[in-house]
Amino acid sequence: MMLKKLTKDSLIKAECYISKDYELVNLVKVIGFESIAFDCKDEGSYIRVFDGQILKWSGPKLGWKEFAIPSSIRKRELCDESTNPNLEPICGGLLGLKFNPVTCDLYISDAYFGLLMVGPNGGIA
């Protein structure tokens, strides 16, 4: 998107360029997509959703698959598909995701569990 400078004699003009080569990705049974990161191998995009899971895009046939969770205390029966903010201390309260470009480790900033790391194969941070 490009924004032109606003002056007395002009209006803001926004131009959006959307690639014709894109794929629409539906998030089924997912609440609150909150953060996105792309790995160092260009193998997928990763998102964190409200219930604490970190999901990896595995292509149109497989869709989104769980890649990591922020803690071993996360209880699936409470957290999966939860929208209850009172469960964040158990499920996680992610602030951001970032891949190390050399090691492909995923660093996770979480409001309750602190700074976490999970290896390139995922799992419990």
Image (cartoon, rainbow, N blue to C red):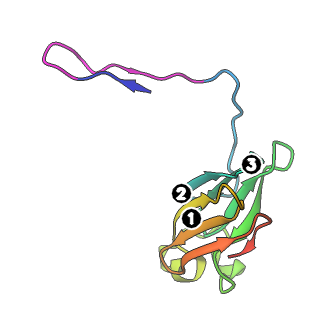
* Disc 2 and disc 1 in contact, CB within 8 angstroms: yes
Callout 2: helix, strand or loop?
Answer: loop
Which quadrant is the C terminus positioned in? bottom right
Callout 3: helix, strand or loop?
Answer: loop
Residue type marked 3: Gly
Write the residue at 53% across / 22% down: 17
Residue type marked 1: Phe
Dot in front, 2 or 3: 3
What residue would you read off at disc 1?
Answer: 50
- Residue 36 in percent (x, y) is at 59, 52
Mark 2–mark 1 distance (CA, rounded to whole Å): 7 Å
Q: Is residue 97 rendered to the left or right of residue 1?
A: right
What residue would you read off at disc 3?
Answer: 44
What residue would you read off at disc 2?
Answer: 34
Dot in front, 3 or 1: 3
Write the residue at 86% across / 44% down: 61
Q: Is residue 40 magenta?
A: no
Q: Earlier in the sequence, mark 2 or mark 1?
A: 2
Write the residue at 71% across / 69% down: 68
Q: Overall secondary structure of the magenta stretch?
A: loop
Above or below residue 91? Residue 8 is: above
Residue 12 seen in render: yes
Disc 2 residue crowd, few under 14, some 14–19, many 20+, Cα 10 Å: some
Which is more toward the observer, 73 or 118?
118
Segment tinted magenta in the rendering: 6-18
Q: Furthest residue to the left?
A: 8
Q: Furthest residue to the top?
A: 9
Above or below residue 5? Residue 110 is: below
Q: Furthest residue to the right?
A: 61
Mark 3–mark 1 distance (CA, rounded to whole Å): 20 Å
Q: Earlier in the sequence, mark 2 or mark 3?
A: 2
Which is more toward the observer, 56 or 83?
56
